Image (tube, grey):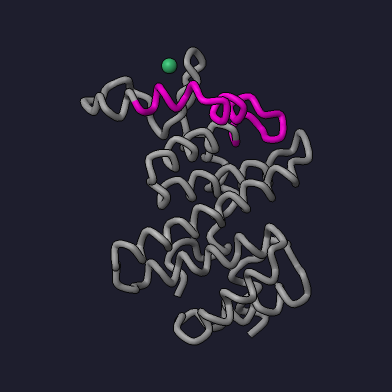
Amino acid sequence: MLPLYNSIFFRPPLQKRLTIKAWIQHCPSCGYCNTVIDGQTSDMAQVYIRKNFMTSPQYQQQLKSSEYPALANYFLCYSLILENEEKFQEAYKQSQYAAWVCDDDKGQNYETGAKNCRLRTAELIDKVKQQQKQQHEPANHEEEDINLIHIDVLRRAEQFEQALNLIKQELNKNSSTNVLKFQQHLCETKDKKCYTMNDVKKSS
Ligand SMILES: [Zn+2]
């Protein structure tokens, strides 16, 4: 079954999401974003790579983008740093957190921002899978989970065809059949809304 979050498809319940601010730090003077900024590292090569990357237009534009709430920009900036270092597994999660921040922002409508975050998340998950294939990592439960996340992110970003293709592949080998069938129905009816595991249970 779903090991990550019981009540919602991989998005933690509101109470947990309220702590999301504490999941990322941002340095106001240089714009560096990371889970923890403590200024202590022995990895000078990484410091060099990151400082260099932070001067790129891509990073600087993301840092100040008006298409996302500031907190989402910080997650996306850290996600860009990780992607640049081919740490796709961590990079996609940061992008997913940014989507949740967009969903939950009450000040403004960030629907397009949320969609873009999810498209980015889906691309990064593709890269995780490619990386795993290259490294010949054996299939395991983690892979089943990442495929479920991939399907949900694609559906919520309105990439229904892509999600349906993935569902078809997964129905043969993934053990979470009830979740897959539920997702299949949502994709066929072009439903991009957020659902909970309770909805899955009710439907089966
Ligand atoms: Zn700084």
Asked whether residue 147 is drawn in magenta, I would say no
- Magenta residues, as a range? 49-72
- Main SS of the magenta part reads helix
In the image, taking residue 189 as reference, residue 46 lies left or right, namely: left
Q: Residue at x 66, y 78 (%)?
A: 184
Which of the 4 image quarters holds residue 175? bottom left
- In-image side of 116 versus 11 (left or right): right
Q: Residue at x 71, y 34 (%)?
A: 67
Pinpoint residue 49: horizontal percent, then vertical percent.
35, 28
Which of the 4 quarters of the picture holds residue 152? bottom right
Percent x, y of residue 29? 49, 12
The quadrant in which the N terminus is found is bottom left
- Residue 174's x, y, as percent? 46, 80
Residue 63 as seen in the image, left or right of residue 54: right
Outermost residue toward the top in this view: 29
Asked where in the image residue 153 lies, by quadrant, the reply is bottom right
Ligand 1: image quarter: top left
- Residue 185 coordinates in the image, percent (x, y): 70, 79
Closer to us: 165 or 20: 165
Give the residue furthest to the left: 42
* Camera-nearest residue between 178 and 160: 160
Q: Residue at x 62, y 27 (%)?
A: 61
Q: Nearer the viewer, residue 78 or 24?
A: 78
Q: Is 52 inside the magenta-drawn segment?
A: yes
